[in-house]
């Protein structure tokens, strides 16, 4: 039987880009709520301590594993050395708390954090620049793995690798040294087909975000005027079971290729309109339903012994 682990991102409680979309709860309460809903992992957010001596007791008390965390990479317009210097403390922290990977998110040239920049103005790379970029990210991924922590590349709205075509180009020009995080929600938002992307790139997928989308919100966007953060504020994203994607088919596709590992709910929205605990419970129930149907055994142990 295939084994899976279910985690969450703290972005449901506190949004790092839109601070107004944040609940006034502590890290401990965030972990307590997600664990009570059934999740055994949590990705890193801004309220996590940077010292493993501080983080480990908090994780142990909550019975939760640190199941990943975002690194703001700038390899598209900065050098390897600058990024190595910035990620090195994160590598040491993640090794100390036994995290599975660091999520590489490209923010160089990106407009994902700028509410004044419409979606249609996102940066684009030509074939030549994509080859250079993909090669550089591969080298960076290999270096991180050599230092004991694999990366997982996150394609993302409003970044240089957003669309399915851009993802295919990046994957075709990069190597095994940079694994992939498949995010069904971001790909669907960008007009892509998650099932086809899994077919094409399953050999490189080492981490999964099970982000759902509200397509009615996305279809109404004016991408020449509205930004990524506008879309978030309007409720473009949600948890599995509350949106438009068929996670029964998505999870079954992962099972067909023998994927084992983390499925992480990353659903940023207004916590006042969509209380994080309630949404966590909805997402967990839906994931357990589809994972059981796909033949997964979901691990119930939280903090690693």
Image (spheres, rainbow, N blue to C red):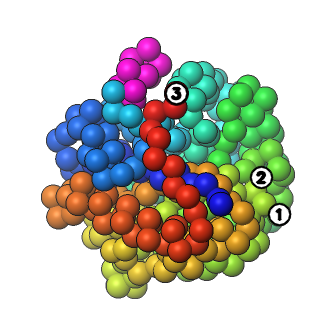
The magenta region covers 49-60
Q: What is the x, y in percent for residue 303?
A: 46, 33
Image disc number at residue 305: 3
Whole-number angstrom distance, CA of label 2 to CA of label 3: 37 Å
* Residue, disc 2: 134
Q: How many marks?
A: 3
Foreground label between 2 and 1: 1
Check disc 2 and report its element: helix, strand or loop: helix
Foreground label between 2 and 3: 3
Check disc 3 and report its element: helix, strand or loop: loop
* Residue, disc 1: 172
Q: What is the x, y in percent for residue 135?
A: 82, 48
Q: What is the x, y in percent for residue 99?
A: 56, 34
Check disc 1 and report its element: helix, strand or loop: helix
Discs 2, 1 touching: Cβ within 8 Å: yes
Foreground label between 1 and 3: 3
205 w.r.t. 163: above or below? above
Q: Quadrant of residue 238?
A: bottom left
Tell me the crowding category of disc 3: few under 14, some 14 to 19, or many 20 or more residues within 10 angstroms, Cα based.
few
Whole-number angstrom distance, CA of label 2 to CA of label 1: 9 Å
Q: Would you say 107 lies left or right of 119 here? A: right
Q: Would you say 271 lies left or right of 263 here? A: left
Which residue is depicted at the point 27% across and 40% down? 32
Tell me the crowding category of disc 1: few under 14, some 14 to 19, or many 20 or more residues within 10 angstroms, Cα based.
few
């Amino acid at each position: 039987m295939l084994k899976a682990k279910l985690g969450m991102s703290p972005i449901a409680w506190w949004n790092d880009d839109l601070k107004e979309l944040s609940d006034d709860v502590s890290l401990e309460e965030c972990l307590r709520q997600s664990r009570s809903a059934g999740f055994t992992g949590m990705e890193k957010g801004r309220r996590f301590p940077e010292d493993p001596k501080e983080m480990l007791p908090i994780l142990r008390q909550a019975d939760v594993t640190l199941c990943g965390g975002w690194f703001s990479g700038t390899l598209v317009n900065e050098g390897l050395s600058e990024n190595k210097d910035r990620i090195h403390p994160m590598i040491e922290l993640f090794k100390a708390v036994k995290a599975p990977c660091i999520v590489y998110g490209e923010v160089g040239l990106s407009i994902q954090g700028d509410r004044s920049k419409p979606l249609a103005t996102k940066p684009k790379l030509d074939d030549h620049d994509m080859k250079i970029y993909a090669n550089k990210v591969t080298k960076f991924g290999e270096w991180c793995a050599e230092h004991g922590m694999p990366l997982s590349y996150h394609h993302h709205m409003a970044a240089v690798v957003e669309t399915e075509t851009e993802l295919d180009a990046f994957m075709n020009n990069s190597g095994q040294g940079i694994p992939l995080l498949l995010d069904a929600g971001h790909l669907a938002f960008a007009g892509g087909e998650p099932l086809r992307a899994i077919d094409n790139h399953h050999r490189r997928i080492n981490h999964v975000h099970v982000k759902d989308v509200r397509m009615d919100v996305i279809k109404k966007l004016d991408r020449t005027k509205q930004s990524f953060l506008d879309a978030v504020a309007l409720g473009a994203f949600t948890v599995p079971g509350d949106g438009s994607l068929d996670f029964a088919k998505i999870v079954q596709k992962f099972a067909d290729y023998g994927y084992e590992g983390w499925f992480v709910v990353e659903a940023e929205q207004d916590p006042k309109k969509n209380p994080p605990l309630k949404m966590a419970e909805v997402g967990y129930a839906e994931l357990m339903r589809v994972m059981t149907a796909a033949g997964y055994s979901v691990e119930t142990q939280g903090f690693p012994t």
